[in-house]
Amino acid sequence: TEPVLEIRDLNVNYGLGDDAVHAVRDVSLTLNRGEVLGLAGESGSGKSTLAYGMLRLLPPPGVITGGQVLYHPRDSEPIDLMTLSTAKLRRFRWSEIAIVFQGAMNSLNPVHTIAAQLCDVIAAHEPRTSRAAQRSRAKDLLELVGINADRLGSYPHQLSGGMRQRVMIAMALALEPRVVVMDEPTTALDVVMQRQILAQLVELRERVGFSVLFITHDLSLLVEFSDRIAIMYGGRIVESAPAAELYRESLHPYSDGLLHSFPALRGPRRELTGIPGSPPDLRAMPSGCAFHPRCPRAFEPCADESPVLAAPPGSDERPGERTVACWLHAVERVKS
Ligand code: ATP
Ligand code: SF4
Ligand code: MG
């Protein structure tokens, strides 16, 4: 495996000084070449902040207070997106890393046809491409996402929500990026539609070859379609693992809770327990492990000390494959 994007110790605040909300906390996460990485967590856990932060697209009062985001180009040294000039960064987005925002389908321009909007994306980055060549690319892109080319002349309101979202994916793929970031809304798109879109992305990934960071509340989707999964809680990554391993045996009690919030995909029926309580208030985080007030397995160190994200004991043959931040799986605790 070869990294394409490496987030290192990223920190994001909303606001300044004592009133700041620390929404992303020391997050490190690697997206490998050709993989689909899923990011899950309850509402408010910091998923969108992480995605926008790493591309420096945070709306005010969002500020990055530390960290690096290394992008590995095809044939040169890694580039830190955090220190790249804004002009270079702008060229980078879309052409190397494309993002489909939460609710993006509503950002299509209502007075322009789908074809015009696809051509505009191409023209903005490749001004020398002829209009005819742009149109032909636009047609190919639509077909790629499963929309018939006779829709090129349609206006956004003439398409269903799912089709509009697929147009957004076509736009994101227009410049053949190596990374596609997709932040799925839960309100606008139902689960059936999310499922279709993710299935489509996975299929395209195989044909076109790019990496995907897919953000959703729906862990069952990620179990089914992603290669690896990272779970966020209170601004931190609390567990990451290959999707199949996470499904077979999650190590963090919060991941357990999320997995028990949907029916089993196969095998014996599981009890649907969900997670009692509510997400932490980022302005008044619990001491120690942020999950301790809700954790059914909390024990003596949990309220006092914060567990670090690290490989669990016995997993050292594949370093970095699986990490967890929980005292139940901390190497030192096991040794003592
Ligand atoms: P969802 O699943 O609902 O999209 P999320 O995991 O994407 O949630 P974020 O939108 O990243 O969560 O929000 C993380 C935290 O940052 C939340 O506590 C939220 O209240 C806070 N936050 C987000 N945007 C702002 C803002 N503009 N100003 C202040 N706080 C914000
Ligand atoms: Fe639960 Fe403790 Fe693990 Fe936190 S560290 S998840 S409170 S067992
Ligand atoms: Mg979000």
Image: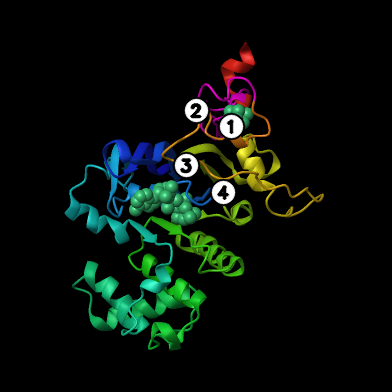
Q: Amino acid at mark 4?
A: Asp
Q: Is residue 57 left or right of residue 251?
A: left
Q: Earlier in the sequence, mark 3 or mark 1?
A: 3
The vertical placement of 129 against 262, above or below, is below
Residue 287 is marked as 2
Observer-side mark, 3 or 1, equals: 3
Residue contact at pointers 3 and 1, CB within 8 angstroms: no
Q: Secondary structure at mark 3?
A: loop
Residue 227 is marked as 4
Magenta residues (range):
299-327
Q: Report the number of numbered marks.
A: 4
Residue contact at pointers 2 and 1, CB within 8 angstroms: yes
Q: Secondary structure at mark 1?
A: helix
**Residue drawn at the location 42% of the way across and 74% of the way down:** 167
Which residue is the site of mark 1?
292
Q: Amino acid at mark 3?
A: Asp
**Residue 107 seen in render:** yes
Q: Is residue 258 magenta?
A: no
